[in-house]
Amino acid sequence: MRAYLLTVIRSIKSNFSKLVSIIFIMLLGIAFVAGLGTISPMIKTSFSQELRKENVPDLILKSASTSGFTDEDGNGLLDISQDLIDSRIATSAEGLTTVDSSMFTSMGIDMGLPEDFPLTRFYGISEDMTIGPISVVEGRMPARSDEVCVERTRSDMIVYEIGDKIDLGTVLGEKTVVGIVSNPLNFSRYKELDMIDQEEIDQIVYLRKQDFVIPTEVIPGVTINVSFPTTDLYVTLRGSTQYEFFSSSYKSFAEEGKKQIEDLFSDEYGEIHILTLEENMSYAYIVNYTGKIDIIALLFPVFFILVAALVVSTTMTRMVEEERSIIGCYRTLGVPDSRIKLKYLLLSLFCGILALVIGLIVGLYSLPMVIYPAFETTFFTPEMVHLMNPTFGLVSGIVMILIILLVTYRVVRRFLKATPADLLQPLAPKAGKKIFFERVPLWKILPFRYKSTIRNLCRYKKNLIMTVLSVCGSTALVFCGFSIIDVAHSLPEVDYPGLTNTIVPIAIIIIVFALFLSIFVIYNLTNLNIDERKREIATLKVIGYHNKEVVMYIYREIMVMAGLGILIGLPIGVLLMYIVLTLLDFGSVGAILPQTYFITLGLALLFIFLTDALLMKKILKVDMSTSLKSVD
């Protein structure tokens, strides 16, 4: 047992670099998936908790009548509010006035607005609002009839400072700005659209409800200013606190509440439009953007994991193959097959679990910290909730661990079918044979160094396939990252306001992780290639090859394989981008700039050169006496 444990320790020491590379490649994939997978839930939870704290309404009832929520007795608003509470549909309801300046004409109201008056949204509010209350950012709320507050600055809206004057026409008169406020329903930094022509609102003004008046003719020839009728009713549904605002269950809950109100009132109080938060523009932006992040979080990790799993499986296979003589010793000493399998399975499991733990920590903490601040350019973001949603990372990690365990088990089982005598002998080099290219006339004029490269590529087909596929995958991911940036910058701001600012950081993360994956892939496969061909390298040194020639003998093959991977990876990247853009429902591959192809090519080659430079010393350190160790 002691001897068995010592061999396990020696195996770890001798294969330390391979085990570390396995851990890092798996860690990279798990961190990438876990980080992307937690961004959308984290954003939704952060905004949901802020909206809950601000007590935003679940439903907004808007009167379609110019007289607002009134009836013959003038108690329509009170009746509706009380009916909602008595029927146990709602816990509270409050009225306010919301009118866009474009609506005055359609309502037949002359407010005496200047000809160049900007498109304005007016709010008539009460200081004691408890549902979706207006919060003061700077200054104070209006206390007199000649005072107003304005919405905090948003993209391209008119900017005001405390003390500025606003001419609101002959009816409302000139007002002084005494406060900058925030409306919890308006948390996007982009303009709202008016209710008539869907044009962008230029400014949002808040008045005291009693000061928001309209000219009304009481008798022929006599007109007085009366308070504007209540147009909106904010409703908090009973039981809504148990839901997160952006969850599918909340959506169903709000729709059910809307249906109950429609059934309760029918046409008793005239036509009423009932809006859920889905009709709120800021809310819709969050749903839209996080939905696109979810698509990216589902598609790219699948591709990423496939590449990582491929390289890890190759590494583990080579490691077990190199220890075939040790497996032979185990069998000679009578070690049970189950214990031999257990050794390698435990090594694989250890690498997988360590990569899973570190990957989850890195992904769940680092990526959200990088991406969440990008939303500040599009939204008035609340404090980030450090939500741990490891589902994506756990699933990807478990899948990779299962793959590596399965591959390890099959390789070890294959060796255990051989006799101990066969296992104790070094694996004979693969026999050479005439290849197809030797029948091509051009073959005769090729220099020997190129002939040997082509022969080795055809001889070690497994190395060729693994390297090409791995480089192809990482190249496609890098290309997609740059392509997303191109497409995002080509999007019309009117249709996709702020999307560029939120999606570009994700694209940069895809590029960075894909480049790191490329480094580990090339390093790992080149390292394995050198270990597998030490005898060949030593022989070249013995017969007089210079260091440069020996290095190029190996690297020439790597560059050919990597070059093939890059050339295949670019069209695959285009195909992947087509699928991504189709699912995201924006942009097209035609928006990808020509230089993106060259940048991807250049970066892929640069990182291949840098990685190979790190391994040059290992090639030069191969001992020439190794060539004297012949296979019996």
Image (cartoon, rainbow, N blue to C red):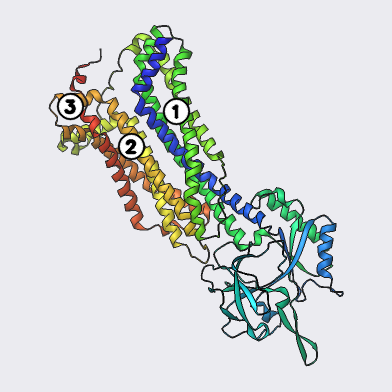
According to the picture, the residue beneath numbered tag 3 turns out to be 540
Judging from the image, what secondary structure is the residue with disc 2 in?
Answer: helix
Type of amino acid under label 3 = Leu
Q: Earlier in the sequence, mark 3 or mark 1?
A: 1
User: Is residue 167 positioned above or below 122 on the image?
Assistant: below
Judging from the image, what secondary structure is the residue with disc 3 in?
Answer: helix
Residue 185 visible in the picture? yes
Q: Is residue 224 left or right of residue 3?
A: right
Q: Earlier in the sequence, mark 2 or mark 3?
A: 2
In the picture, the quarter occupied by the N terminus is top left
According to the picture, the residue beneath numbered tag 1 turns out to be 351
Q: Is residue 142 left or right of residue 33?
A: right
Work out whether residue 498 or residue 538 is closer to the camera in this orientation and state it. 498
Q: Is residue 308 left or right of residue 183?
A: left
Q: Residue furthest left?
A: 544
Q: Earlier in the sequence, mark 1 or mark 2?
A: 1
Position of residue 303 measured from the top left corner of the image (x, y, whole percent): 46, 41
User: Is residue 435 positioned above or below 249 on the image?
Assistant: above
Asked if the residues shown at circle 3 and circle 1 are in contact, with their CB atoms under 8 angstroms apart, the answer is: no
Position of residue 473 measured from the top left corner of the image (x, y, whole percent): 40, 41
State the mark number for residue 522. 2
Position of residue 246 measured from the top left corner of the image (x, y, whole percent): 63, 52
In the picture, the quarter occupied by the C terminus is top left
User: Is residue 288 positioned above or below 608 on the image?
Assistant: below
* Disc number lying in front (3 or 1): 1
Position of residue 441 measured from the top left corner of the image (x, y, whole percent): 19, 37
